[in-house]
Amino acid sequence: MNPVLSRIPVKMLGDVLSTRALERIIQDAAQERRVHPAQLDAQALESVLKKDIYRRLQLSLPAKLAKKRVLDVLGEVQRVAAEVGTVDYVPADLSGLEEGVRRFTLYFDWPESQRLRGVLNMARQEESVGNDVSALLQEGESLIEQMDRRLAEGLVAQGQDLAELRATFERVSAVGGREVRRLETLLEQVDDAQKQGMLLPGEVERARTLSLKLRRQLESSVVQNTPGDAQPDPAAEAKLRALELELVGRRLGDVLAEFSPLIGARPELEAHAAALNDALAGGTLTEQAVADWQQDLSARRGQLRSEQQAQLAELERQLAELPASGEAEKARVTLGLARHTLEEGGLAADELRDLALAVQALQSSPGGASETLRQQRELSELERSARDVSGAGEELAPQIAQARERLQRGEDVDIDALYAVLERRMGQAAQEREGLDARADHVVREYDSVRDLAGETIQKLGRLADTLRAQRRLGQLSVQARERYLQTLTEAEALLDEARAEHAAAQEVTASFGEDALNGLLDIFDLESAESGLFDVDASEPEPGSDLLVGGKNEDEDLRPGTGTGSGDSAGAAGSPGTAAGADTGGFNPFAFLSGTSAAASHPADSLPAAASAEPGDAAPPPLTEAQHLPEHAWLIAHGRRQAGQPDHAAERLAPLLQSAAELGITRLRFEDGDWSWSARQSPAGTWRLARAADAATLELNSGAWLKQD
């Protein structure tokens, strides 16, 4: 269907003003000009926007925000008018609804999709006999807009899930096996769907379940491969339990969304949903409890559809006994829409309620029920609109119920006062959205300032920043999407605080040792750098540790007494005649850039291990009794030498670096290369614990508790 200028304000301001109010303002303006609303041109709409609509917006929004929203709408009106001009509205054109049904065929179980199919079937039926279908077309367009919004929100959530699942896959891929390959296949399917703008909730749920199972399997394998009576790391257990609760919470949310019409129709189900949410908040909700409730809801939905079909048949019989009238015809359309909705697998609680009230009013006063039925329809429209506005549904529910009771008694109802409550809530929601967007912009800006730091915190914050950018681009948010937006913001802000602390620590190092010192230190630990070659191991290399001789001795040269030999021992360069020359021509001296170490720069072997060996009793450190409890890929380092752990070229080259770091007052280091994540921690006694793993999460699982031992 061609765009109509008069519909643009309704679409763009529907989140701050009720559709009813906007349509009434535009209709009044068209009547003043004696034209159809679709024939209003850009100039006429500009006058309406700047006067009537702007004045109405100021009742619920600050003047500055109201002006901004009006200017946004005016810009869109002028753009569309320049492109296509003003066109006549053709109410009998069903192509828009038919296209909407085709687009959302994949989501046939959505309540909006079921309702849209019912609206289309009823519109075809009415058009075939020449009846006006403008109201049905308008409702169908509204349903398509709701589904467009739901799809956009779902794609943002699916993208966030995909990013987290990819991060988990990198952690568990080392486990290998059929389930890892299955997870990889699921992620590829979800990624393809994401690129095509499709939702695959079943595949996402299976991937989440499988990734959690693999995380649990990875932790179990770590415990089984750890010597001694090792117990699972409490921190890792807590994290896995949090992931399990998150998975259960997502499933509960999916169930609530799927069965929302049923739950809303039964107070006892609403109470049970609240109890499950409380259990989730308390950490006691189980996957089985959600699965059992989902099965129970499926049975109840079938039972309720049968009850509604029986109720519909009774109302149809009563309606057939009433005399023909305009209101009776409208009731007949409502009845047909309810029938088609039930046939499409949906529920028709609202339609049946409205139909029952209409039949009752027509039976009581066949000739004077028009005003009562008009107000009842407005109440129903108000109720549907309030469901999409945070806090409005809860506040208006008792007032709407009281209004219906008064209408049944033949009393007047002030519906404008109820709409004022809705618009006040809509204004509050718009201002809250402005605040959420401002917070999201702040998080993204701050992330950009610390994104160069490494570590799991920054990686997680980066994924959340991407999600915030996507959520920021969404238009009007549903209640569920607003909650997800707020949750993402809360998590991102917490991680941002951690990232700032890490960044402050880096700045403290800069302030203490200078920018050049920090850059040199980062260069040393940038193990991915192809230029450093620190961990490039070749099969033809000499015995591990022998390349640390700064003097550049040949492998077959005899070592004089005192020069040292064995893994990680670099002291032998102290008495070598070529020491100074070797240092000048590329001898290994990673901390030569530090201020106050000029002597060490020319004689690194003298300044590091040799300095330590000058103390009494330091030449042969006593064996460490805890060596037998080392995890895999872990070492004990003392005085720049490996004291325990399997011989390893990379670890032994790090040993003198740890000694130098200790002299700088550094007690903890974390860094990564192309293959490993590393962590080192110095005990109060001066011994370094060094460990590595394929990634930071596995490192924490394998060696986290051991590294933190004193």
Image: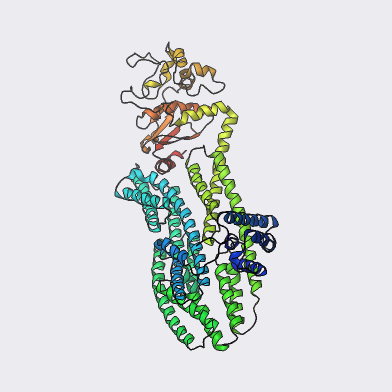
Q: Could you say where residue 138 lies in the image, as x and y percent from the top left?
A: 52, 68
Q: Is residue 292 above or below residue 181?
A: below
Q: Could you say where residue 437 lies in the image, as x and y percent from the top left?
A: 59, 52
Instruction: Please state which of residues 706 and 674 is positioned toward the viewer in this rendering.
Output: 674
Q: Is residue 216 left or right of residue 439?
A: left
Q: Number of labelled discs?
A: 0
Q: Name, please, the residue furthest toward the top.
A: 577
Q: Could you say where residue 342 lies in the image, as x and y percent from the top left?
A: 42, 74
Q: Is residue 247 above or below residue 306?
A: above
Instruction: Please state which of residues 687 and 412 is positioned toward the viewer in this rendering.
Output: 412
**Location of residue 388 by image quarter:** bottom right
Q: Is residue 576 left or right of residue 435?
A: left
Q: Is residue 229 visible?
A: no
Q: Is residue 160 visible?
A: yes
Residue at (51%, 62%) from the top-left corner? Answer: 145
Q: Is residue 678 left or right of residue 485?
A: left
Instruction: Please state which of residues 166 and 350 is positioned toward the viewer in this rendering.
Output: 350
Q: Could you say where residue 249 lies in the image, as x and y percent from the top left?
A: 46, 59
User: Colour scheme in the image?
Assistant: rainbow
Q: Name, please, the residue furthest toward the left.
A: 178
Residue at (36%, 47%) from the top-left corner? Answer: 218
